[in-house]
Structures are given as structure tokens and as C-alpha cells.
Image (cartoon, grey):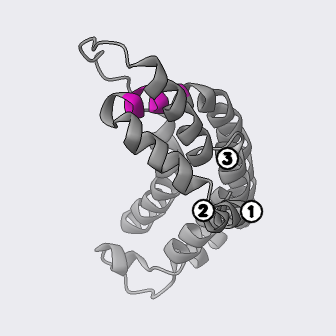
Amino acid sequence: MMGIARAQGLTMALALALPGAAAAQTVPPAAPQTAPADPARLAVAGKVVAKLVPQGVYLRMMRDAFPQMMDAMIGQMSGLTPADLGEKDSSGKTLEQIAAERDPAFRERMTIMTRVISDEMGKVMDKLEPRVRVALGKSFARRFTLQQLNDLDAFFATPRVLRSRRTIC
């Protein structure tokens, strides 16, 4: 029976791993200071980044895509057996069946957990998004020439890319 409990623990750990890993990231040591980017390059880089990371994209991602991803991941994990995870088990029961026997509200609890994580991570990402855009703009301004940035800006303004962005973002 200890193997089944361990399998349940693995299921829960995997279900929680993605958001937990994102929330638990540590800040790496500060990189050595580099010279400020050319203001002209920085201005164009800001326009390019605004097209790549439109306002609210992380909030929408967490709200719209994260729950579906978690449901799919939990669904896949729930169909596994302890034997699939290398545990000795002859019952043939899936992790979903085992969880339901031990906790009849397991599926409901996972649904609620996914919704709460999605909502809270959306709020966190929404607050971080402006800083992400600023950092990307600075990075692009250092890494690309003014001509390259202008080319990127022109590319992202083409009708085909604009249509694709509306579909994706």
C-alpha cells in the first residue's frame, strides 16, 4: 500500500510542479552592468517588444491556456497505474481510481486548485509583464542593430502577422 500512497504523492507533485516551479524561481545574481543601449535602438526595440508581448498576454495565457493544460496533464496522469510509475502493484487500478477511493472529492479538488492557481498566477504575471517588456526592450536594443530592429518592426506590422497575432494573443 505504501507504493500506492507514493504514486498518489507523485501525481500531486507533478500536478503542482509547473506552477510551483514558476513561483519558486530564485533571482540569479545581477549580471555585470553593460553600457546603456542607444536611445534610437531602445525606442524601436520597445515597439517590437510591444508587438511580441502585447499588454495582458500573460494574464490571458494563465486564464485561458493554463487550466486546459493542467486538465490535460492531470487527465494523463490519472490514467496511469502505480506500475506505470515503477511501483509494485497488482491491482491494475489507475491513479484516478485510487484517488477517488481515498478522496471522493479528488477531481473536484483538482479542478478548484487549477482555477485558483490560474487566477493567482495570472495576477502575478500581469504585474510582472511591464517589467518583462522593459527588460526585453533593453536586451533587443543591445543585441540588434537599428536596421535589424526596424526590419523586425516592419515585419510585425505586416497584415499577415497582425492577423496571426489577433488569433494567438
* Element carrying mark 2: helix
* Location of residue 92 (image quadrant): bottom left
From which residue to which does the magenta span run? 134-141
* Amino acid type assigned to the residue bearing label 2 in the image: Met
Say if the magenta span includes residue 31: no
Q: Nearer the viewer, residue 38 or 7?
A: 38
| Residue found 55% across the figure and 31% down from its top | 46
Does residue 161 appear in the picture of this structure?
A: yes
**Do we see residue 117 in this rendering?**
no
Please state the horizontal and vertical placement of residue 142, each as a whole percent of the image.
33, 28
Mark 2 or 3: in front is 3
Using the image as rendered, state which of residue 147 and residue 160 is in the foreground. 147
Q: Quadrant of the N terminus?
A: bottom left
Give the residue drawn at x 37%, y 23%: 27
Circle 2 Cα neighbour tier, 10 Å, few/some/many (<14 / 14–19 / ≥20):
many
First in residue order: circle 1 vs circle 2: 2
Residue under label 1, please give it.
105
The amino acid pointed to by label 3 is Val
Mark drawn on residue 70: 2
Q: Earlier in the sequence, mark 2 or mark 3?
A: 3
Secondary structure beneath label 1:
loop
